[in-house]
Image (tube, rainbow, N blue to C red):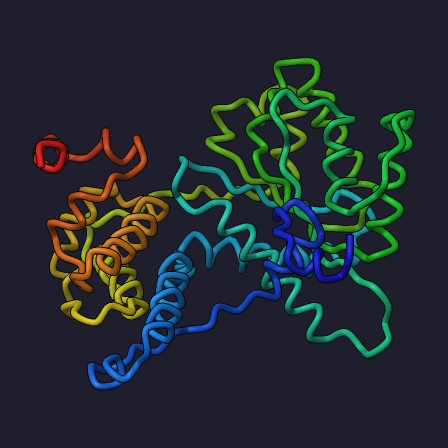
């Protein structure tokens, strides 16, 4: 593969190339143009301008939720505490329901840590890989997990290589590159009640002893998934700090203010020409009902509504538009019946038309 082909290729986050691009990526904000500036654009200039706005809205922004800030703060503290630890290093587990921003939180922790490290690297220090990111595959075995690490690092694997050989190669490369933070996603795919799950847990413990890094696990309701069950589970619970990611609530004045601040930050990122400022805050209760306070559902709703406002030509988000955008099944089934009925009637009218 040529350098140009490599530059154009999209790499997943679970490769060092994809992770590096994620760390280096800085979204370019597209400033909104006034009416006279818009009219002065040629057709191709307007097309490029709208494409840039669409790209902006698909990225929108990364909300600094309370969970994210706690994960970054705790993760940073643990990496400092573990720096001189020879063994029994402390780790972090981020658990919670789907859609509460867990993966975003741990990847932002990794991004912040790597940027912090790279800002302080002296010239000519050689290659470094401060952070590694892998996911636990379904029905994983210890060898499958070792292969995931090898894939992230780009280690060529021979068909005859066994688990021990792959694991040794992974540990040697991570030690050589001075990896300090290992992010392990989808940890709920490990079940300590099964033999393979217990063996994968042992493999992770072995890796944490071989690699002088802080390990961070992310999973869906890992407490109920049995990660802390039995002798192995007690050992994990004794070494890992847990942060439970939760949906936003608006039960108290302080919680409501957090929700309003989030909506205001989202609205400030919009690049729509006829949007009414303050509309999201005005419909704060409706947005909470639609999304059940899930940051993932809310982010999708605002992004999708922004794109539809552009493609329809209205250039503004309205309550009706927010009601029409389909969301994930969890958000839809927890929404009030009246809201679901309204979307169903809208869909029927469109089908009839």
The quadrant holding residue 141 is top right
Q: Could you tell me if residue 91 is visible in this image?
A: no
User: On the rendered image, what quadrant is the C terminus found in?
Assistant: top left
In the image, is 301 to the left or to the right of 56? left
Regarding residue 321, the answer to whether it shows in the image is: yes
Residue at image location 77% in from the left, 57% down from the top = 2
Q: Is residue 48 above or below residue 190?
A: below
Q: Quadrant of residue 123?
A: bottom right
Which residue sits furthest front?
43
Q: Position of residue 95 (x, y in %)?
A: 49, 38
Where 234 sits versus 283, above or below? Answer: above
Number of numbered tags placed on the structure image: 0
Judge by depth and name the residue closer to the eye, 134 or 13. Answer: 13
Q: Residue furthest top?
A: 194
Where's residue 128, x and y in %?
A: 79, 62
Please indicate whether residue 9 sits to the left or right of residue 246 in the image.
Answer: right
| Residue drawn at (27%, 58%) of the image | 306
**Residue at the spot 14% in from the left edge and 48% down from the top edge:** 286
Q: Is residue 37 left or right of residue 63?
A: left
Task: Give residue 160's position: percent from left, percent from top.
Answer: 91, 25
**Nearer to the camera, 236 or 119:** 119
Q: Nearer the viewer, residue 253 or 142?
A: 142
Residue at the spot 61% in from the left edge and 56% down from the top edge = 110
Residue 123 lies left or right of residue 28; in this view the side is right
Which quadrant of the view contains residue 232? Answer: top right
> What x and y, as percent, mark residue 293?
27, 45
């Amino acid at each position: 593969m040529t350098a140009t082909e490599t530059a154009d290729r999209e790499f997943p986050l679970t490769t060092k190339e994809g992770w590096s691009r994620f760390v280096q990526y800085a979204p370019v904000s597209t400033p909104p143009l006034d009416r006279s500036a818009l009219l002065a654009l040629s057709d191709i200039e307007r097309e490029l301008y709208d494409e840039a706005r669409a790209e902006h809205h698909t990225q929108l922004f990364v909300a600094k939720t309370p969970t994210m800030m706690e994960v970054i703060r705790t993760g940073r503290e643990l990496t400092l505490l573990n720096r001189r630890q020879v063994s029994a290093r402390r780790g972090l587990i981020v658990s919670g329901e789907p859609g509460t921003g867990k993966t975003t939180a741990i990847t932002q922790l990794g991004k912040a840590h790597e940027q912090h490290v790279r800002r302080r690297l002296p010239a000519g220090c050689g290659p470094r890989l401060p952070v590694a990111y892998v996911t636990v595959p379904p029905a994983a075995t210890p060898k499958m997990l070792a292969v995931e690490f090898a894939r992230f690092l780009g280690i060529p694997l021979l068909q005859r290589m066994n688990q021990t050989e792959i694991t040794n190669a992974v540990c040697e490369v991570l030690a050589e590159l001075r990896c300090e933070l290992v992010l392990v996603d989808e940890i709920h795919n490990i079940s300590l009640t099964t033999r393979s799950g217990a063996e994968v847990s042992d493999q992770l413990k072995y890796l944490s002893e071989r690699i002088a890094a802080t390990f961070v696990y992310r999973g869906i309701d890992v407490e109920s998934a049995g990660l802390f069950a039995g002798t192995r589970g007690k050992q994990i619970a004794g070494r890992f700090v847990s942060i439970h990611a939760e949906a936003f609530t608006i039960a108290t004045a302080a919680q409501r203010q957090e929700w309003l601040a989030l909506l205001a930050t989202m609205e400030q990122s919009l690049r729509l020409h006829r949007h009414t400022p303050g509309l999201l805050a005005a419909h704060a209760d409706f947005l909470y009902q639609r999304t059940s306070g899930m940051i993932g559902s809310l982010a999708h709703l605002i992004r999708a509504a922004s794109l539809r406002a552009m493609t329809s030509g209205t250039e503004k988000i309205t309550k009706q538009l927010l009601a029409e955008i389909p969301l994930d099944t969890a958000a839809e089934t927890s929404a009030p019946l009246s809201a679901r009925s309204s979307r169903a009637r809208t869909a029927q009218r469109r089908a009839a038309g």
